[in-house]
Image (tube, grey):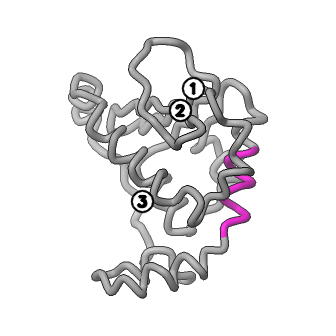
């Protein structure tokens, strides 16, 4: 499946900044925790423990603040500056998840921005690059959920 080029309307971002960020942050950390030790190697991510991370979805007005603790990912509620901010549009995050675009291409075309401790950003990028996505696809297909096996399938 090829994601068409799109940008969410600007009024949506203005509304998105006013909405509570906790529900999408909880969904994000739940997904990350499901992937931890199954897809994402905990030992590789150890340098992220205690770091404040901010995932910004620019065209949706979302700012998802979270951290990694020894027990897993958790949302953050404080207003402290993040150690690493990763910003991109909804379409670009989807393209990354579906492996239609690689982080380097998006970074060098300035569609994926990293601010703060860039060594943490490199760690995140390298960890995602090292994931055996074929194994993930096989596991998802075994769940027999609609479209689960196709989510990370190559060439879609």
Q: CA distance from mark 2 to mark 3?
A: 31 Å
Find numbered disc 3 in the image and state the secondary structure of the residue it sits on.
Answer: loop
Asked if the residues shown at circle 1 and circle 2 are in contact, with their CB atoms under 8 angstroms apart, the answer is: yes
Earlier along the polypeptide chain: callout 2 or callout 3?
Answer: 3
Q: Which residue is mark 1?
A: 52
The image shows residue 28 at horizontal and vertical percentages of 40, 46
Q: Secondary structure at mark 1?
A: strand
Tell me the chief SS of the magenta region. Answer: helix
According to the picture, the residue beneath numbered tag 2 turns out to be 67
Q: Are marks 2 and 3 in contact (CB under 8 Å)?
A: no
Q: Is residue 14 left or right of residue 4?
A: left
Measured in 3D between alpha carbons, the distance from the residue under mark 1 to the one under mark 2, in whole angstroms, is: 5 Å
The residue indicated by pointer 3 is 5
* Residue 65 as seen in the image, left or right of residue 112: left
Residue 132 position in % (x across, y down): 66, 74
Q: Residues within 10 Å of mark 1 (few under 14, many from 20)?
A: some
């Amino acid at each position: 499946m090829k994601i068409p080029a799109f940008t969410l309307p600007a009024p949506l971002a203005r509304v998105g900044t006013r909405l509570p960020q906790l529900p999408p942050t909880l969904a994000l950390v739940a997904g990350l925790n499901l992937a931890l030790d199954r897809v994402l190697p905990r030992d590789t991510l150890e340098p992220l423990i205690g770091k404040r991370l901010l995932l910004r979805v620019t065209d949706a007005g979302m700012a998802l603040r979270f951290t990694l603790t020894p027990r897993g990912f958790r949302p953050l509620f404080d207003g402290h500056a993040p150690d690493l901010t990763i910003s991109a549009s909804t379409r670009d995050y989807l393209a990354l998840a579906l492996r239609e675009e690689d982080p380097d291409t998006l970074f060098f075309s300035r569609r994926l921005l990293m601010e703060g401790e860039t060594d943490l950003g490199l760690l995140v990028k390298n960890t995602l690059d090292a994931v055996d996505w074929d194994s993930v696809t096989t596991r998802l297909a075994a769940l027999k959920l609609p479209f689960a096996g196709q989510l990370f399938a190559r060439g879609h």
